[in-house]
Image: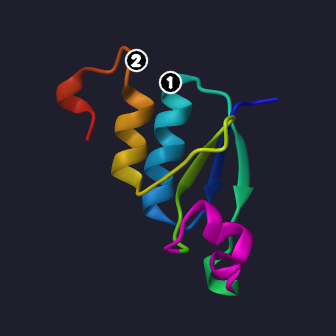
Amino acid sequence: MSSLTLFDYLPSRNAWKVRLLLHHLGREHRTVTVDIFKGEGRHPEYLRINPTGKVPAIQLADGRALAESNAILVYLAEGSPLPADQRV
């Protein structure tokens, strides 16, 4: 089982950036779809992950969560072969 969970919604361009980097890095992850147009981003369980109710967000195995696509991209790129000047 993966130690990273991506909270995603396919039409989201910001979530697409995170999906693309995860794929590029070959990073295993679990995906949970959050249909923001059906109000799933406002569910109390999801608001504990991302208080803004938006996607994307990631949750690590230890329970820590990170939201906002650019912050997620920088986090995922740390220690990768991706050059620093191309990270965001």
Mark 2: few/some/many CA within 10 Å (<14, 14-19, 20+): few
Q: Which of the two discs, 2 and 1, labels the residue nearer the N terminus?
A: 1
Q: Are marks 2 and 1 in contact (CB under 8 Å)?
A: yes
Q: Considering the numbered disc 1 on the image, is that residue within a helix, a strand or a loop?
A: helix
| 23 displayed left or right of 38 | left
The magenta-colored residue range is 39-52
Above or below residue 2? Residue 37 is below
Residue 55 image position (x, y, % from top left) = 53, 64
Q: Main secondary structure of the magenta part?
A: helix
Quadrant into which the N terminus falls: top right
Q: Which numbered marker is on residue 50? A: none
Which amino acid, mark 2? Ser
Q: Residue at x 55, y 74 (%)?
A: 53
Question: Are there few (<14), some (14-19), or many (20+) residues within 10 Å of tag 1?
Answer: some
The residue indicated by pointer 2 is 80
Residue 69 at x, y percent in the picture: 40, 53
Rendered view: 52 above or below 6: below
Furthest toward the left, the residue is 85
- The amino acid pointed to by label 1 is Leu
Q: Nearer the viewer, mark 2 or mark 1?
A: 2
* Pick the front one: 53 or 62: 62
Tell me where residue 45 appears, x and y as whole percent.
Answer: 73, 69
- What's the residue at 45%, 32% (across, down)? 76
Question: In the picture provided, is 85 more to the left or to the right than 12?
Answer: left
Q: Which residue is mark 1?
A: 25
Q: Quadrant of the C terminus?
A: top left
- In the depicted structure, whether residue 31 falls above or below residue 50: above
Return the residue found at the far right: 1
Q: CA distance from mark 2 to mark 1?
A: 8 Å
In the displayed image of the protein, which residue is found farthest to the bottom? 38
